[in-house]
Image (cartoon, rainbow, N blue to C red):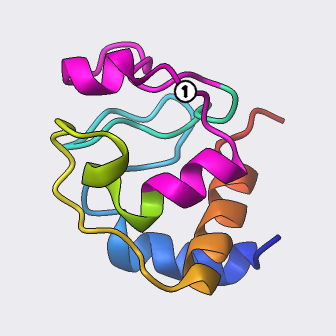
Amino acid sequence: MGDADKGAKVFKQKCSQCHNVNKGGKHQTGPNLYGMYSRKTGQAVGFSYTEANKNKGITWTEETLDVYLTNPKKYIPGTKMVFAGIKKANERKDLIAYLKRETTAS
């Protein structure tokens, strides 16, 4: 498991321009990520996903996020997410820890 506090910095640098993690927050260029854990790809209500995202059919977990965040376009060909990915495993682990802490309903 990564360090969620370090992951907050990674999120701010690499994700926050397109996503937020606020309960009830509005979608931006990318969907609001609150509630993403244990949700299938392409299922945030009110966000316009590509068919590739809707049809991928995986559930977001630490494992699937790790693969996805390494290279989003390789994992979901046809996604409109332009992010190239995070090559450093420790940065991905920290980000995933942050996302789990911030997007899971308490």
**Where 2 sits versus 61, above or below?**
below
**Residue 72 appears anywhere in the view:** yes
Question: In which quadrant is the N terminus drawn?
Answer: bottom right
Look at 32% across and 40% down and name the residue there. Answer: 76
Answer few, some or many: residues within 10 Å of disc 1's Cα (few below 14, many 20 plus, some between 14 and 19).
some
- Numbered range of the magenta stretch: 39-68
* Residue 18 falls inside the magenta stretch: no
Question: In which quadrant is the C terminus drawn?
Answer: top right
Residue 35 occupies quadrant: top right
The percent position of residue 78, horizontal first and vertical second, equals: 17, 36
In this rendered view, identify the residue nearer to me: 41 or 26: 41
Residue 15 occupies quadrant: bottom left
* Residue 40 falls inside the magenta stretch: yes
The percent position of residue 88, horizontal first and vertical second, equals: 51, 86
8 on left or right of 55? right
18 on left or right of 102? left
**Where 8 sits versus 45, above or below?**
below
102 on left or right of 44? right
- Identity of the amino acid at label 1? Ile
Numbered marks: total: 1
In this rendered view, identify the residue nearer to me: 28 or 61: 61
Look at 64% across and 61% down and name the residue there. Answer: 96
**Residue 49 appears anywhere in the view:** no
Residue 89 occupies quadrant: bottom right
Look at 43% across and 81% down and name the residue there. Answer: 87
Location of mark 1 (residue): 58
**Where 34 sits versus 2, above or below?**
above
- Secondary structure of the residue carrying numbered label 1: loop
The percent position of residue 2, horizontal first and vertical second, equals: 76, 75
